[in-house]
Every structure is written in structure tokens, then in C-alpha cells.
Amino acid sequence: MGETLNKIASIFAESAVDAAFDEIQISESEKVDKAIKAVKGALDKAHTGTLIYIKAKPLHNVLSNYCRDNAIQLINEFVRKYENFINATTPITGRYVIYAKDPYADKSDEHIKTDIKFTTLIVYFAEISEESTKAVVSKALKGIFGIFKNYNIEMIPSYK
């Protein structure tokens, strides 16, 4: 009888070790999954940052190779593109878009360079805002549509 109890105890011990080993494997796997997710998130953010920098690169270039006419033209292009964002952030920035025949006729080169820098910030903030909005909407949609994961939906009928 003692031998039978030892065998039973041995089986339980092996079972407990196996269960513990499985649990360790699962938690290691989960750690790796979390690490991969974090790295992917960092890469996505770095990629997004690079894309935003590329969008603002002409503004950086015009500052390093300053030419008054090119700078004014570039400011005008970016202001037209980001007009809604500039006007939406007026309470924060104190700036808004106005249209004039030649708004820089009586402005100094330093003033134009300051406007280039401000426009660069607008590009960064507008693009970051857009990317953040996309991420929030994407996460919300995944949450909403995630409830359908348990259902086997092969098609959604529609009428033509």
C-alpha cells in the first residue's frame, strides 16, 4: 500500500510540475507577445514621426537654405493646406488665417523665418492630431466589432 501511495504521489507531483511548467510557458509567451506589441507600437510611432517629419521637410529645407520668395510661397502652400487646423487652434496659438494681396511685403526676413517655424509646428501638431484620431477611432471600432469574434459570419447580405 505504501508503494501505491508513492506512485500516486509521484503522479500528482509530475502533474503539478507539468501544470506549473505549462503556466510558466504561457506567461513567458504572454510576455513575449506584450514585448512584440510594445515594439510594434514604438515602430508605428517612429514610422508616424518619420512620415510627419517628411511632410514638414520642405519647411526645414527653406530655413536652412533661406530664400525669401521660396519661403513666402511655401508658407502660403502650407497655410492653405492646414487652414482649418490653424483657425481651430486660434484660441491656443493666437494666430488665424487671413488673406491679403501681399502679406509679407512689409515684413522682415526674421518675421518670415518665425512664420516658417510656426508653420512647421502646425504641420507637426495637425498630423499628430490626425494620427491620434485615427488610432482612437481604430481602437473603438476594434472594440465594437470585437464582439462579433465569437460568431461565424461568412457574409453580410445586401441588395443591389
Image (cartoon, rainbow, N blue to C red):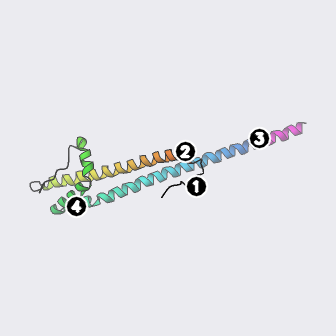
Q: Earlier in the sequence, mark 1 or mark 4?
A: 4
**Looking at the picture, which amino acid does disc 1 mark?**
Glu
The residue positioned 81% from the left and 39% from the top of the image is 9
Q: Nearer the viewer, mark 2 or mark 4?
A: 2
Q: CA distance from mark 2 to mark 3?
A: 40 Å
Q: Is residue 19 magenta?
A: no
Quarter of image, res 154: bottom right
Per the image, label 2 sits on a secondary structure element best described as: helix
Residues at discs 3 and 4 in contact (Cβ within 8 Å): no
> How would you classify the magenta stretch by its main secondary structure?
helix
Q: Is residue 52 left or right of residue 26?
A: left
Work out which residue is located at the far left of the displayed protein and give it. 106
Q: Earlier in the sequence, mark 2 or mark 4?
A: 4
Residue 154 is tagged as 1
Residue type at the position of mark 3? Ala
Q: Where's the N terminus, which quadrant?
A: top right
Determine crowd level at label 1: few under 14, some 14-19, many 20+ residues with C-alpha closer than 10 A. Answer: few
Task: Check if mark 2's residue and mark 3's residue have beta carbons within 8 Å.
Answer: no
Quickly name the residue at label 3: 13
**What residue is shown with label 2?**
147
**Quick one: 149 or 130, which is closer to the camera?**
149
In three-dimensional space, the C-alpha distance between marks 1 and 4, rounded to whole angstroms, equals 54 Å
Residue 21 - label: none
Amino acid under disc 4: Val
